Image (spheres, grey):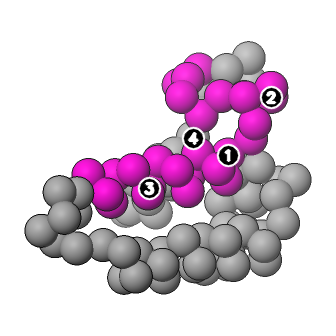
Amino acid sequence: MQGLVEEGQAAGVFCRRRDAHLMMIAILTLLNSVQQWYRPDGGTDIAHLTDEYVEFVVGGLRCSVATTCACEPETDRGPTRTMTDLEMEDEP
């Protein structure tokens, strides 16, 4: 997990000011806690939960709104790169 954060930082997808080790701990804690409260019949759809968690985690790894907003596709530094962009670069 820490390696994935570091890869994103090196590629410019995630903020380089974030501590990759602490982000790994925070992400794993967030994900591991789901089993304590999630109930399939509890009114929260698993697809919605997944989408919200992905947005929360990836948004938290990106630079702050003061430097670049994760919600905006364009910044003064050019287009924001996403994990999908990186995955597509790896394809032949």
Kindly identify which numbered label has been placed on residue 62: 1
Please, what is the three-letter code of the amino acid marked with disc 1? Arg
Distance from Cα at disc 3 to Cα at disc 2: 21 Å
Distance from Cα at disc 3 to Cα at disc 1: 12 Å
Disc 4, SS: loop
Q: Is residue 74 left or right of residue 42?
A: right
Q: Magenta segment range?
A: 47-74
Circle 3 is placed at which residue position?
54
Front-most of residues 28 and 74 = 28
Q: Say few, some or many: other residues with alpha carbon within 10 Å of mark 3 (under 14 / 14 to 19 / 20 or more).
A: few
Viewer-nearest of discs 2 and 4: 2
The residue drawn where x is 48% and y is 82% is: 32
Q: Earlier in the sequence, mark 4 or mark 1?
A: 1
The residue drawn where x is 40% and y is 82% is: 36
Q: Give the answer, above or below, for where 5 lies relative to 81.
A: below
Disc 2, SS: loop
Residue 67 image-quadrant placement: top right
Q: Is residue 32 left or right of residue 52?
A: right
Q: Say few, some or many: other residues with alpha carbon within 10 Å of mark 1 (under 14 / 14 to 19 / 20 or more).
A: many
